[in-house]
Amino acid sequence: MKEEGQQTAATGQRKNKKDKGIPRKALKNLINNELEKQSQEVFKKLLKSEDLPAVEQTTEEAAVVHTNVTCDGCGVGPIQGLRYKCSVCKNFDYCASCEERLGHDHAFLKIRKNGGAPDVMITMLGEDNPMTKEEESKDPSADPM
């Protein structure tokens, strides 16, 4: 045993050193990324679940199909029933379930009929609201740094 201990001391290796595979930080990041992906999938399944109570709508409202409109919350398209269009974002819509269950920074327009969205909306925002990348690219007065 002494010879073995002397050999390990001579080569600079420790006897108790374990083989390390993936570094701890990389493993942590891998686990966090996988959990994030799985949680999004589970959340989408819950939104589409029949176990959650349905949003209250009249039979007329529930029968409406908004063609060429996809929900930005759950991805269902076309939206059937009430449609909620963001009053600020250019192309952002929620179905009735997502409007009830998800949050959003802006007010929505409630659209009851297919094709009932206005052709033009003008929204006044305060100076403290930052411009989106799309708005910055179209604004000639934007200061390019």
Image: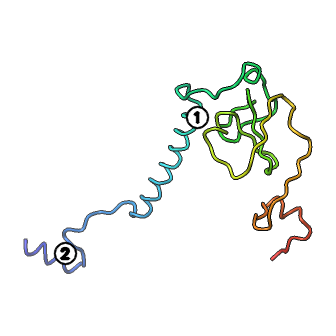
Compared with 8, 103 (above or below) is: above
Residue 20 rendering spot, x and y as whole percentages: 33, 63
Q: Estimate how packed mark 2 is, as few (under 14), some (14 to 19) or many (20 or more) residues with alpha carbons within 10 Å.
A: few
Relative depth, front residue between 123 and 34: 123
N-term mark: 2 or 1: 2
Q: Residue at x 65, y 26 (%)?
A: 56
Relative depth, front residue between 42 and 108: 108
Compared with 92, 145 (above or below) is: below
Marks 2 and 1 in Cβ contact (< 8 Å) = no
Q: Which residue is mark 1?
A: 47
Residue 25 rendering spot, x and y as whole percentages: 42, 64
Q: Residue at x 77, y 37 (%)?
A: 110
Compared with 50, 27 (above or below) is: below
Q: Estimate how packed mark 1 is, as few (under 14), some (14 to 19) or many (20 or more) residues with alpha carbons within 10 Å.
A: some
Compared with 75, 20 (above or below) is: below
- Disc 2/disc 1 C-alpha distance (Å): 59 Å
Q: Quadrant of the C terminus?
A: bottom right
Residue 120 rendering spot, x and y as whole percentages: 91, 45
Q: Residue at x 61, y 26 (%)?
A: 54
Q: How is the image coloured?
A: rainbow
Q: Quadrant of residue 72?
A: top right
Q: Residue at x 55, y 43 (%)?
A: 40
Q: Is residue 100 left or right of residue 80?
A: left
Q: Quadrant of the N terminus?
A: bottom left
Q: Quadrant of residue 126?
A: bottom right
Q: Which residue is mark 2?
A: 8
